[in-house]
Amino acid sequence: MTVLLTNLPPELIIRILEDLPGRDIGRLSRTCTQLRSICRTDIIWQKLCQQICDIKVEEWDTTYYNIYTKVLHKYGRCLGLWRRNMRPYGGLMQIKVDNGRLLATEYKPPYVSDIHGPLRPEKVFSIGINKFKNQTEILCLHGYGEAHPGSIEYETEESDVVFKCCQMSSHAHPMGSSVELSIMIKKETNNHTIPFRKDDQKRLECYMKNVPKYRLTRIEVQRPDPVYPIQPGLFLAHYRSHGIEMFLLKYDMSKKEAEVIKITGDPNVPAGETSIYINLRKPMQLTKDQQLDVNNLLLLDEDDIPDSDDVQPRNQPFVIPPGFSTFLDDFTPSTCEYRYLSKGRVAGTGYTNPSFSPGHFSVQSQDNFYNLWLLMHCIFGYYRIKHF
Ligand SMILES: [Zn+2]
């Protein structure tokens, strides 16, 4: 016996539709007027919306049907964390649901005077619904005037998103470009309380040049796992003259290796490159005396350290060899939980002649690790980004 879908009671049809992808519901709704009206039942679209993200419909002031078909169906995949492709400086972007729209915010590192200070957010664009026209609205939020039209494109690579401003004339400051520049410098120097150096000038010029177009590559933060000596995530570190940079710590347990990847970069090692490789096969336990002599540390070869799959902490003293330059807090812990061999990326300006420099990676706590750059006689501290 054949039963037509339309002969079923509407509640049952809705129940069936709830399990279909949005595209199939759209196709079905075009087959007859009865199905068209059933397909518009908002509870079906509510489920589709919730599969993508948590939606508070009252903030959107429209139906789930509109939210799904006009925003989430096409732009839901923009949600999440992104690295800005802007060589060499890069950047961190987050796109999330905010007050009835998708909002893209760029987060700059804290001011160089306070690595534990807040990240500096800047709204870049939003995707929502224009209520008067009842259609999708992509707005560029840059500039000194009103929000103005922008566009989103997907590149051939699935994960790449490109945002473009469609009305650059709205960016100009009414009093001219010199006023605009001085406002930007004021912002970058925390109201002239920190120096504005040549490196900062170059970074600012690069930002200004790239304002019309944001190319984004997805950042995947791995899920926590007890096998990791320190959980994956985003970190900040003070990279000497380059200022504070942002990093992603991620693991490849098939190789027993971890990487510290640059989310922001500098003219030597650009964003997107790996700053440190950590060899998790080579856990170490060193005495205070062994750590005090950098030549002794440099002589420790991979072959001297036995391979180990043991993930238990190896608590030990932690001392910085004399003469090392640091950008650490006044307080440096005197113990560490894990210590591994590492290699850090060094390169000339423009990422010329990239090579590896031997190092030691040490885990101080779940929110803090260090890397000793043994040949360069310096140590950098990496601090977890917790809130933004
Ligand atoms: Zn714009």
Image (cartoon, grey):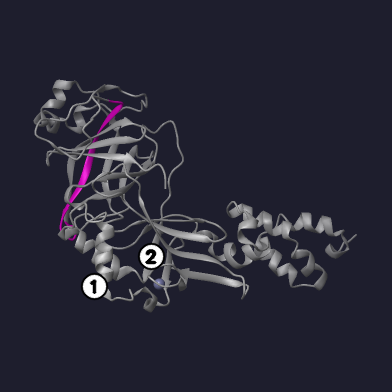
State whether residue 168 appears in this view.
yes
Neighbor class of circle 1 (other Cα within 10 Å; few <14, some 14-19, many 20+) is: few
Per the image, label 1 sits on a secondary structure element best described as helix
Q: Quadrant of residue 124?
A: bottom left
* Whether residue 153 is situated above or below residue 51 in the rendered picture: below
The region drawn magenta spans 336-352
Q: Which residue is mark 2?
A: 215
State whether residue 153 appears in this view.
no
Mark earlier in primary sequence (1, 2): 1
* Whether residue 38 is situated above or below residue 230 in the rendered picture: below
Left or right position of 222 against 282: right
Neighbor class of circle 2 (other Cα within 10 Å; few <14, some 14-19, many 20+) is: many
- In three-dimensional space, the C-alpha distance between marks 1 and 2, rounded to whole angstroms, equals 27 Å
Residue positioned 49% across, 64% down in the render: 126
The one nearer the camera, 255 or 233, is: 233
The main secondary structure of the magenta stretch is: strand
The one nearer the camera, 158 or 96, is: 96
Residue 90: percent from left, percent from top: 31, 58
Q: Which residue is mark 1?
A: 178
Q: Quadrant of residue 17?
A: bottom right
Tell me the kind of residue under disc 2: Arg
Magenta segment includes 220: no
Residue positioned 46% across, 74% down in the render: 148
Residue 213: percent from left, percent from top: 37, 70
